[in-house]
Image (cartoon, rainbow, N blue to C red):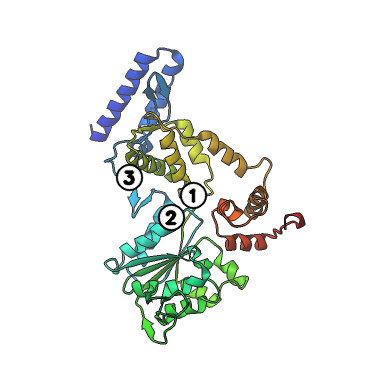
Amino acid sequence: MTLASQWRSVRLCVAFDQMNVLVQNEAVMSMTATVVDFVETDRFESLHVAPIRVLRGETETGALFLGDPAVDDEISEGMVGRSRELRQVLEQIEMVAPTDATVLICGETGTGKELIARAVHNRSGRRTHPYVKCNLAAIPTGLLESELFGHEKGAFTSAVSQRVGRFELANRGTIFLDEIGEAPLELQPKLLRVLQEREFERLGSSRTLHTDARLVAATNVDLPGMVEAKRFRADLYYRLNVFPIHVPPLRERPEDIPLLVRYFARDCARRMNRRITWVPAAAMDALVGYSWPGNIRELQNLIERAVIRSAGERLEVPVSEIDEGIGAAKPSGSTGTLEDAERAHILVTLKATRWTLSGPHGAAKRLGINRSTLQFRMKKLGIERPPLAR
């Protein structure tokens, strides 16, 4: 008998013993055949899913055991999962990383685009050199050119000293420009030049500098649509789109959700000094069935909240919150297109915020996108502010 077979036999005997000692009725004993079938599956071995769980007098079927922290998760470069979609992304990283090609990472917010950018750097020949990142949406437009290309002392009123820009810092390494769709039109020609010619000037200087930085960019907006709307230069888009990598949303790889839940629950429990050992089956069903508009970031935040709420070994997942999300995401009788669903979701958010687009309580913040992105989506979907809301 192999080691795996012996382990299955031990787990099966324990399950049967618990059933015989704690409960003696025909309804439970009729589960025997189901238990045997389930224990023999590979899924049981890989995900630590138990057919029966007895804890403090309760019987829990289909629970997910978090397992030994020493057990290796399916993790590569910080990305957890074993789905076909994730494997395709990892294969693309392996192909492009050894080259110096520009990479454009496309995907919804919260899908882990920055992890992919760092993986490209870590698996390249530039990994011993700087990895410099810059979120274009987080920097005021007036300061963005100085941030990327640097400035000389006295270049503008507050330039009291010389500043080295991000492209200069990333020489011989990698520069990651997140939210590339937020680059203002007046800055885009300079980005195109540094990509094509590898040269630029600091603000307030006529001396041309050279950089050997590899560019990895990311976006969660429709760049071809922005090109069509004249909000993004076509030549810059084609120069960025040398090797595109599409990151699938979490709803397209539900088989990775149990692995992510286990990973985040272990990590949060360790940081908070909690002991969480299992997840109820009903909670896991709700997690897998949810559409996750915020993707992995939303799942991570929910698991952290669940760990905070958990007093014992059981992970107390707020299932009611998930069910409400499912109800909002799937209105009864809705058979419209994805564009219809997006339009309806944006309208609901706009009405809830009284058509306030920006700010900490604005619609853009609630939707997890930038104000300019929201305005672009509203224009494309034909959403106009009603007269009374102006």
Task: Give yes or no for contact between labels 2 and 1 (Cβ–Cβ under 8 Å).
Answer: yes
The image quarter containing residue 389 is bottom right
Mark nearer the N terminus (2 vs 1): 2
Q: Amino acid at mark 2?
A: Gly
Residue 278 location, x and y as percent? 38, 32
Residue 192 location, x and y as percent? 47, 78
Mark nearer the N terminus (2 vs 3): 3
The local secondary structure at tag 1 comes to helix
Check residue 318 in the rendering and tell me which mark sits there, or answer none. Answer: none
Name the residue at 34% across, 55% down.
77
Q: CA distance from mark 2 to mark 3?
A: 17 Å
Look at mark 3 in the image and give the residue it sits on.
Answer: 73
The local secondary structure at tag 2 comes to loop
Name the residue at 65% across, 60% down.
378
Mark closer to the observer (1, 3): 1
Mark nearer the N terminus (1 vs 3): 3
Packing grade of label 2 (10 A; few <14, some 14-19, many >=20) is some
Q: Amino acid at mark 1?
A: Asn
The image quarter containing residue 68 is top left
Look at mark 2 in the image and give the residue it sits on.
Answer: 112
Packing grade of label 3 (10 A; few <14, some 14-19, many >=20) is some
Q: Nearer the viewer, residue 91 or 344?
A: 344
Residue 292 location, x and y as percent? 52, 46
Q: Nearer the viewer, residue 5 or 297?
A: 297
Q: CA distance from mark 2 to mark 1?
A: 9 Å
Residue 244 location, x and y as percent? 46, 66
Q: Is residue 197 left or right of residue 67?
A: right
Q: Amino acid at mark 3?
A: Asp
Look at mark 1 in the image and give the residue it sits on.
Answer: 295
Name the residue at 43% across, 79% down.
194
